[in-house]
Image (cartoon, rainbow, N blue to C red):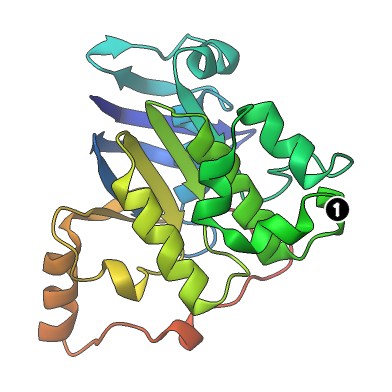
Amino acid sequence: MTISLRHARVRYGPLEALHGVTLAAPGPGLTVLLGRNGSGRTTALRALAGLVPLSGGAVVWDGVDVSRTPAYERARRGLCLVPERQAVFGSLTVHENLELAARDYGFALEAYPQLEPLLTRRAGTLSGGEQRMLALSRALLARARVLLVDEPAQGMSPAVAARSYDLLGAVDACVVIAEQRLPPGLQDRTGVIVYELRRGAVVFSGEAGERERRRTAAGRPPRSPGTAPGRGPGSAG
């Protein structure tokens, strides 16, 4: 299975956020859309999910043009999007959030044991990292064919973040994640495809290891986890 953008253009009013972006995310496998704030990585995810219309180009899923297929229909066919914000039902408990995804949610508690003592808490009272754990758990329970996740490990400890990337890498689905920087655990992982976006255009495509070798050869070693650029007010992906 594969989901792709072909020469995709997206406009927000007079501004064009994607300038003819072409990328393909095969599955099962992990694809990373990499870029700083304003690069277009979040817009690319939203275009794949059908949440923003294309002004040009196409979204192709398993060889079929789904550009005009609404988001709810893509979801019905097995596409799941985990946005960066508001990815859980804040007024419901953790238990209720999980039960909406699956009656038997034991796998979610195996994946994230930290959620078990929080089952009776309302999701809106959880920390940012706990909400991400809950959102990813719900997505994993959905058994999606295509899973799109915007900054999956935001707010998590390094250990929990590493566990999250391992879980996403093991899913039998086409998994696409958007990140500001390439997570350390993915830099040398075989088969991870990276598309680096800058100002709405793809500036690199290839395997993660190839990108890191190029950066090293150019005298730009990989960023450490603590040196990522911060979010500015009003920034958008």
Q: How many marks?
A: 1
Give the quadrant of residue 72.
top right
* Label 1 sits on residue: 121
In the image, is 183 to the left or to the right of 99?
Answer: left
Residue 35 screen position, x and y as percent: 41, 61
Q: Quadrant of the N terminus?
A: top left
Q: Position of residue 37 (x, y in %)?
A: 54, 62
Along the line of sight, which residue is nearer the eye, 169 or 220? 169
Q: How would you rate the neighbour count of disc 1 (Cα within 10 Å): few for under 14, some for 14-19, many for 20 or more? A: some
Front position in the image: 32 or 131: 131
Element marked by disc 1: loop
Q: Is there any visible trace of residue 213 in the rendered image?
A: yes
Q: Tell me, yes or no, if residue 82 can be seen here.
A: no
Front residue of this view, candidates 113 and 180: 113
Amino acid carrying label 1: it is Arg
The residue lying at 15 percent from left, 57 percent from top is 207
Q: Nearer the viewer, residue 210 or 57?
A: 210
